[in-house]
Image (tube, rainbow, N blue to C red):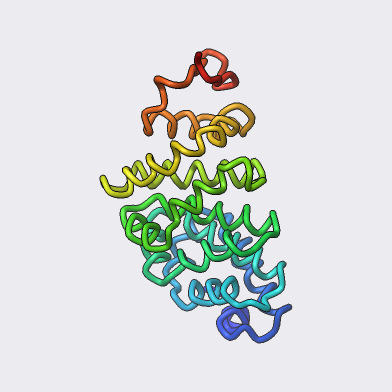
Amino acid sequence: FFNLSICHALRNNCSSSSSSISAATFHSLLVADELRPIVGSKRDIIYSLIHIIKTPNSPPRSIKDALKALFGVALYPLNRSSLIEIGAVPPLFSLVVKDGRVGIVEDATAAVAQIAGCEESEEAFLKAKGVGVMADLLDPSTGSSLRTKENAVSGLLNLVRGGGEKVGKEVREMVLKVVDGIVDVAENGSSKGKGRAVALLKMIDCSSDLLIDYNSGFDSLNRSS
């Protein structure tokens, strides 16, 4: 189904240019919903995408294309557990923590947020200390972009929705320290981001401390006196 030369270049990381082109090709293929389960079933391709983001000397363009491809794979829910099994979570969080380039952090957190939406994510995220990483991104002192904050909110919300009591407790404890960051998303984020921020605040029982104006489409969310 896939061009064999593209698969070979991606698997063997023949050169920075060929691996980037291959990752970009798979990213473009994953725009089509029907191709996501097919690409996600190719474990060697997923391994190769993860290898690109793990390799210190990978060019930024290759990393971004690989991250976007992993995001596309994770959009298909049944692929998420496979991504966790293959080992996508640790290198994704490593990029978030160690890479200061805004675009790469945004793309990495977008993939993280999608992968969080499965039962298997609880153990993997706790092991990688992912809850703390995502909560830190919501701390105003970190200077995270609004898109990164939205992704962090989505990831934490997905963890609470799909995980058990242990991860739910950790999310609540960590997020209560960065409520201002969630409020920022609720006030200034995209329409989806605002809704997710409000949902996260409700899940962590912040409703008694915050005034939410539902009639204005989540545009007004202020601390009550």
Identity of the residue drawn at 54% across and 65% down: 94
Percent from the top left, x then y, of residue 56?
64, 77
Identity of the residue drawn at 56% across and 74% down: 54
Identity of the residue drawn at 34% across and 41% down: 161
Percent from the top left, x then y, of residue 105?
62, 56
Pick the front one: 221 or 20: 221
Pick the front one: 1 or 210: 210
Percent from the top left, x then y, of residue 118?
36, 52
Side of 21 where 125 appears, left or right = left
Identity of the residue furthest to the left in this view: 165
Position of residue 79 relative to residue 159, above or below, is below
Position of residue 100 relative to residue 4, above or below, is above
Position of residue 69 relative to residue 149, above or below, is below
Q: Quadrant of residue 49?
A: bottom right
Q: Quadrant of residue 20?
A: bottom right
Q: Say how many tags the image has.
A: 0
Identity of the residue drawn at 61% across and 33% down: 190
Pick the front one: 35 or 167: 167
Percent from the top left, x then y, of residue 112?
49, 55
